[in-house]
Image: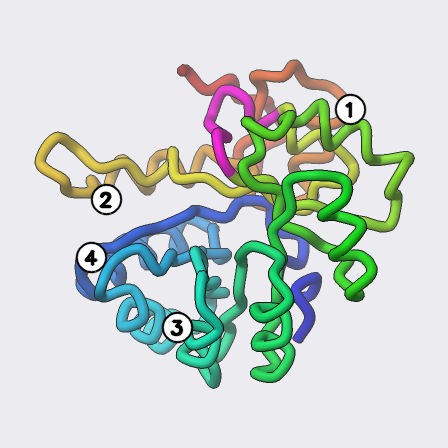
Amino acid sequence: MSIEAILGDHRIVPVLAFKSVDEALAVSRALVESGIVLLEITLRTPVALDCIRAVAAALPDARVGVGTIVDPAQVAAARGRSRVWCRQALRPDLAAAVRECDLPFLPGVATVSEALAARALGFRTLKFFPAHASGGASFLASLQDVLPDLGFCPTGGINQTNAGDYLRLGNVRAIGGSWMVRRDANGGIDLEQTRAAAEGLPHTTRVTDHCRRNCSSACITPRNSARPLSLPP
């Protein structure tokens, strides 16, 4: 399955780092039940691969992405996991490993030169990271006419205040961030707060089309609603 087919018309990719398999299952289930099915579980903790396996097995509607890949061996470790895709920097060794394992790949870029290099390798949907530090929504807007056949999934510095700036762009397929899954002072994740944040997000292209036409930069249209919602900072 291609990365474009996995993304479909879904617009939000929570970027997740879990401390345990139980935490991963609870948070991922809350997100999926709230309508968010694209989940990027990063390889930033010792239990990350176990979390990816458990979530992919327990939640058939989830489309689990592997993030923060820095070694081709990590690509091989994700091989054979249903509905698993990879999201990381564009490096020749990683691209070769992904193709060898036949995994959908969302290569990361931060410049026009890197985007052109990814395009030359046959990729048409790219991760833009770190988005805010690399020019943000205005940078992606400037690429719409220059590289019209490329789509982007910006991540890095995106939050509930600036998400609408990205979602209104025609070349943005989805946005990634962790603002909807926050840890408290004790290091835990409040599932009710996660559900509330997730249910207020624009999950599909259908609802965010409203934002492209009508809304201010702070407006995000909630799922299954024609009325714009301005989320507080």
Relative to 90, residue 15 above or below: above
Label 3–label 1 contact, CB within 8 A:
no
Numbered disc 1: secondary structure:
helix
Label 1–label 2 contact, CB within 8 A:
no
Circle count: 4
Q: Residue at x 48, y 29 (%)?
A: 157
Name the residue that disc number 4 marks: 23
User: In this view, which residue lies farthest toward the left?
Assistant: 186
Name the residue that disc number 3 marks: 56
Q: Is residue 56 left or right of residue 116?
A: left
**Structural distance between the alpha carbons of marks 4 and 3:** 14 Å
**Structural distance between the alpha carbons of marks 3 and 1:** 36 Å
Colour pattern: rainbow
Which callout, 3 or 1, points to the residue nearer the camera?
Answer: 3
- Quarter of the image with the N terminus is bottom right
Quarter of the image holding residue 32? bottom left
Give whichever of discs 4 and 3 has the lower sequence position. Answer: 4
Q: Residue at x 80, y 50 (%)?
A: 116
Q: Is residue 155 left or right of residue 189?
A: right
Q: Residues in magenta?
A: 156-164
Name the residue that disc number 2 marks: 191
**Structural distance between the alpha carbons of marks 4 and 1:** 38 Å
Which callout, 2 or 4, points to the residue nearer the camera?
Answer: 4
Q: Which mark is residue 132?
A: none
Crowd rating for badge 4 (residues with CA inside 10 Å; few <14, some 14–19, many 20+) = some
Numbered disc 3: secondary structure:
helix
Q: Residue at x 61, y 26 (%)?
A: 164
